[in-house]
Amino acid sequence: MGKGKIFEADYSLRLPLDQITILISATVMRSRGAGQVDLATYDPKAKNLTLYELKSSNRISFKQYRRLRSSALLLGVWLNCSAQIKVISNKS
């Protein structure tokens, strides 16, 4: 297992327990011109979706951010909720 997958698996254990973890198909998102989502949670009380982008560096490219923003907008419409993006770096 690569470093990115290990980081993703480790971070998924830190997600809020009062939220629902969402599995999002990369194929579906790409077919709509949106970006792949590493992790996602839904807070039913707040009607809020959080998309997590896990990075090995402290930077995210503008193209990647634009794809993630498209994902957030699309998923927000589909789920009738607000959506936010959180970029998490394993560089502490």
Image: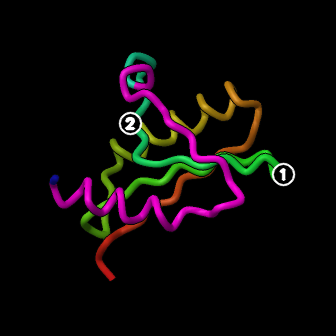
Question: Where's the C terminus, which quadrant?
Answer: bottom left
Does the residue at mark 1 contact the one at mark 2 (Cβ under 8 Å)?
no
Position of 63 compared to 69: left or right?
left
The three-letter amino acid code for the residue at tag 1 is: Lys
Along the line of sight, the residue nearer the viewer: 81 or 66: 81
Magenta run includes residue 57: no
Secondary structure under the numbered disc 1 in the rendered image: loop
Farthest top residue in view:
31
Q: CA distance from mark 1 to mark 2?
A: 25 Å
Magenta stretch holds residue 21 = yes
Q: Residues within 10 Å of mark 2 (few under 14, many from 20)?
A: some
| Residue assigned mark 1 | 45
Q: Residue at x 46, y 48 (%)?
A: 39
To which quarter of the image does residue 78 belong?
Answer: top right
The residue carrying mark 2 is 36
Which stretch did the figure color magenta? 2-29
Image position of 69 with respect to 6: above or below: above
- Type of residue at label 2? Gln
